[in-house]
Amino acid sequence: MTGPVRIAVVIPTRNRQQLAINAVRSLLDQNPALDIILCDNSTSAEPLQEFCRGDARVSYLRPEGELSMPANWDFAVRRAMELSPATHFSVHYDRKLSKPGAWAKLAELAGRIPDRLITFGADVIAAHPPPLRLWQTPWTGGAYEIESGRVARLLASGQIGRISHLLPILSNCLVPRPILNRIVERFGDLCDSTGPDSTFMWRFLALEAGYVHCDIATAIYYASHRSTGVGYLRNKGGDFSDFMQTYGERSWLDHAPIPGLNLGQNLLYHEHELVRRQTGERLPPLDREAVLDDLAGFLQWVAEPGLRESFRRLLREHGWTGSEPEPYPRPTWRSIVWQKLTRIRMKLLGETPPHICGFSFRNDEEALSFALRYPRRAEPDRTHLTLVEPEALAL
């Protein structure tokens, strides 16, 4: 790929009008200017259509009929590739705000390595496990080579939680146009399966030798009460019921370690097996014992005790012999006092968070304000990357 970098950011959304508008606004003043494409799969077009008419920097897309989430993401990116001459594309959650200036570093790096997929990190505001907390991810500011095979082996051995911050899922990476074309040519679509993020990731890992991780926190995820993923993990709440309604009567997780089970990363493992069969087993087989242990670790996420117990029995029937991890601890009075004193000291002295702190807040607005006012600083420690054995990129 030659010539200057041009980035198109695609925001697929459904019935989250204000969140989508907030996401667009966080992208409007980025440098360089971005091609912003909002794909509206909502039941009513009027609110977002009217918003997009007010700004020529934003393109509005709407599929002809109601689509499932994976079909809408697939339609959105592939249509954006037709509308925009961009060299690189990225999917941006409507539940995500890009930090001021975040895209300048990504654009600079893409200009130096225009043929490589680039992943990047983000901070997270989440209510599960309670209370509502802000997790500010560590970052170094460096760029690192990561081998696809190494990542695939870690995932197949149940290590998802330890490397989730640097996986090439579609919503946290900048993808050159040729890579998107290769995936579509090989599989017939980009991500139209179950979970579009997982679908894209496994297809990429099977086809491409590696990628580059830009170790910066570019954005903040919030509004977890609307999260489809959290609703899936808890089997309750979020937008998961709507996801399933639009998904329709197609088979569901039939290639997963425990078919049809909405628990932990069972969906991701289902997509692994699909792609493994489609690519002549270019991906490693799942370590079943490790995968079952990983699934069991998510039992505490399931909202209903009776359902949780039935899932536990099902795991045992499928060969799980391990024990559950300790429940997530709730804040103690000592940690609450420490948080209050730390936040006072930060405000008075201009200090930044001392670590991936997990400060608790009353609501998303309070947490977002804190995250933007006190961004975590870069640090030389690469502990959060060591499991993937990164190689510092020489630029």
Image (spheres, grey):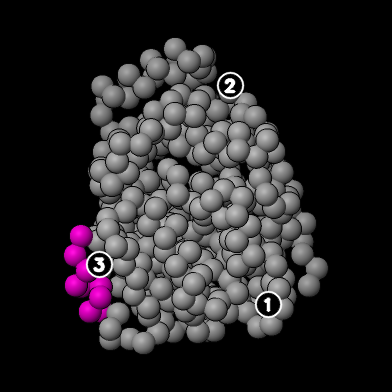
Residue annotated with mark 1: 111
- Boundaries of the magenta span: 43-51
**Residue 17, numbered circle:** 3
**Element type where label 3 sits in the image:** helix
**Element type where label 1 sits in the image:** helix
**Residue 289, numbered circle:** 2
Mark 1–mark 2 contact, CB under 8 Å? no
Q: Quadrant of residue 88?
A: bottom right
Q: Amino acid at mark 2?
A: Glu
Give how far apart the Cα atoms at labels 2 and 3 are. Answer: 43 Å
Answer with mark 3 or mark 1, whichever residue precedes in sequence: 3
Residue 314, x across and y down, in percent? 40, 17
Answer with mark 1 or mark 2, whichever residue precedes in sequence: 1
Residue 93, x across and y down, in percent? 40, 61
Residue 193, x across and y down, in percent? 45, 44
| Residue 44 in the figure: left or right of residue 198 | left
Label the magenta part by its dominant secondary structure.
helix
CA neighbours of label 1 inside 10 A, class few (<14), some (14 to 19), many (20+) = some
User: Magenta includes 44?
Assistant: yes
Give how far apart the Cα atoms at labels 3 and 1 are. Answer: 33 Å
Answer with mark 2 or mark 3, whichever residue precedes in sequence: 3
